[in-house]
Amino acid sequence: MIDQSSSVTFIYIVEIAGITLNVVATWSKSISSHSLSVSIENPKDDRNHHTVKIDLSGWSFWGKKGLKTLEADGTRIDVYWDFRQAKFSNVPEPSSGFYVALVSQDVVVLTIGDLVNEAMKRTRKRPSAREAALVCKKEHVYGKRVFYTRTAFDGTGRREHEVVIETSLSGPEEPEMWITVDGVAAMRVMNLNWRFRGNEVVTVKEGVAVEIYWDIHDWLFGSCGSSCGLFVFKQKLVSEGRSLSFNGGVDENEGGEDSLSEYCYVLYAVRVD
């Protein structure tokens, strides 16, 4: 029914030599291979990009463990990885059995994957005093009228949600769109010719409030061929003055306002005719 995404990108904020940098990890998947591209970017200098690409398509067992070095803002960064036990499914990134570690100035500034202890043993370095923060996940999903993905809304990855976007864009009726989360209808948008951009706050399981932004202009008014709809999911954080009720609403108490989490999930829904 739905083609799975061919790439997914995670953006982390790290501190290296007192400078705040972005680490962009892009996992890619084709029919026969997987790969990972790790880029170090200075958000204040668009020209300052440094990239390491790890090809996981080789059949060599030992080729799945390695080390590469790059330089960012005059600082050496060592990238360690081990995918010998990695388990892959139908998504670009492995589900378990791997690590990627970035080391600079005798400090592990970032670890990706579940084998954190193995990464620390191999690098023999201490963890950074300032923990790296995952701030964004970007994913491409392909389909005709239905788009499916699984993702966390809080950036920790501990609680994933099943998200399905379904559309009806042609026919005698006005174009509509439905979004379900964990099998429960979360949002219905009618009259898409007028509401092709917008945002709504929905409540998902366990009382989590999520703001959903959408821009599907290209689906409706784009040229022939594939077109892309943009969706952004940001969890709303509830302060002490307000709490989510059991029925999914918000109990009003004195003081406090909701605020959006720093983390966001960005979905590019590519419509293929």
Image (tube, grey):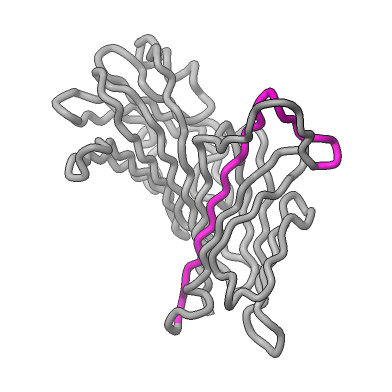
In the foreground, 59 or 216: 216
Q: Residue furthest front?
A: 254
Query: Residue farthest to the left?
Result: 74
At 44% across and 41% down in the image, what residue appears? 10
In the displayed structure image, the side of residue 193 where residue 40 appears, left or right: left
Q: Does the magenta stretch include residue 229?
A: yes
Compare residues 93 and 249 and report the one nearer the observer: 249
Q: Residue at image x 68%, y 82%?
A: 174
- Residue 28, given in percent of the width and then of the height, sits at 42, 51
Classify 162 as above or below 80: below
Q: Looking at the image, which residue is at 24% across and 25% down? A: 77
Work out which residue is located at the far right of the displayed protein and give it: 247
Q: Residue at x 77, y 42 (%)?
A: 205
| Relative to 241, residue 86 above or below | below
Q: Where is residue 13 in the image (x, y as percent from the top left)?
A: 38, 30
Residue 267 is situated, as x and y percent measured from the top left of the image, at: 52, 55
**Spot occupied by residue 202 in the image (x, y as percentages of width and height):** 70, 49
> What is the count of numbered marks?
0
Question: Residue 155 or 140: which is nearer the viewer?
Answer: 155
Read off the magenta span: 225-248
